[in-house]
Amino acid sequence: MGHGKEVKTRPDPEVDVQEKGEIFFFYRPKVGKDEAHSPDDVQRMYIVLRPESGGDRAVEEKQAPDSGKEGLKKQQNSGGEGGHGKEEVNIEEQPLLRLIVMGKKSLPDPAKRSRPYWGYVELVTTNIQDIKDDLKGEEYTTATRGTRHRSAARALGEGVYRILKHDSARRRGHTHLIYKLELPSPARDDEAGEPQEAMKVEPEASYLIQIKNPEQPRSGGGDEGRRFRGLQSKRRAAFPAHLQGRFGSNRYAPADPPDLLNYEGCEFLLIAASDDVEEELGLQLQTETTEAEHGGAGAAGCSDLVKLFGEVVDVKPLLSGSWD
């Protein structure tokens, strides 16, 4: 469907788009379950970000291909560690994909004040098959429970996103992750889909996004420590010096540049900002679909998610807005 376009609806020169692309949402039923009928049946929620060039930023920096889970898939290291090193990727010539795991198995409600939601980058790759392998179902054997079945992920939503830098009177130099769904279609006559509503995947949303400093020690006591213990040290990203320097001595930094998200083990917080992007930021996201394309076979035919991942995931929740 493409990355759409953004239109400024009021003068706001302090909003600067850093990255644009496609966003896909998935969930996976718990181990041993073939279906999910509520969030209680969900094992994990995933987000896949696919940056696409809009003419301003054709090259992104990512972890070295022999590091992290990406390297493990190429059998060049022992795995289990965060991404490190660096390489440049021309996203006009090859795909770049990030697989993200949300800790609470949902997004924060963008219309309500709430505690930040923690997530981390599970996989960064230029090989679409790597993402498919992580989303597909499988049988595996454990020493204590024998053969176990892990169901394939379910497609939850598809849309366009932006990462942007925002300077405001209240807070300077922070970054937002904003998105607008294309599927399930917000233009449908019925209410928002059951799984989308339950997991807070709204038709559009704006979140502040803050990247966690991997070199700061894990929090001990206190409210933050109880909520965000984070990944073990060996699984955290190891940013190159020029990216690590963005943190200084701070525990968190804006997602500026978005290349910070191109390292496996990158941890971040999403903070609810608004469910009305235009009202909040004076920016309207426009998708590349029409109402006539929404629903049924038409939707499946124009969906990039279906084209990329339809062979390994269940797309019914995406197209129908219902649980399995």
Image: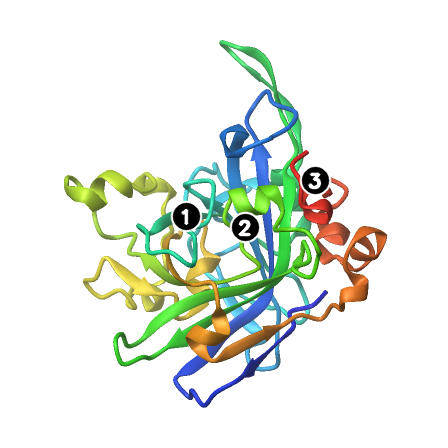
* Residue 136 to residue 148: above or below: below
Q: What percent of the width, then of the height, locates residue 180?
A: 58, 64
Residue at label 3? Answer: 313
For numbered disc 1, what is the local secondary structure?
strand
Q: Please say if the residues under marks 2 and 1 sit with CB atoms less than 8 Å apart.
A: yes
- Which of the 4 image quadrants contains residue 16? bottom left
The crowd level at tag 2 (other Cα within 10 Å; few <14, some 14-19, many 20+) is many
The disc at residue 119 is 1
Residue beneath the point at 73% across and 57% down: 304
User: Disc 2 and disc 1: Cα gap in Å?
Assistant: 10 Å
Compared with residue 72, is residue 277 higher up or lower down, i.e. above or below? below
Disc 2 is placed on an element classified as: strand
> Is residue 129 something one can see in this rendering?
yes
Residue 74 seen anywhere in this rendered image of the structure: no
Query: Residue shown at 71%/39% (left/top)?
Result: 314
Q: Quadrant of the N terminus?
A: bottom right
User: Label 3 sits on what residue type?
Assistant: Val
The spot of residue 279 in percent (x, y) is 46, 75
Marks 2 and 3: CB-CB under 8 Å? no
Is 153 placed above or below 266 here?
above
**Rendered location of residue 2, percent (x, y):** 69, 68
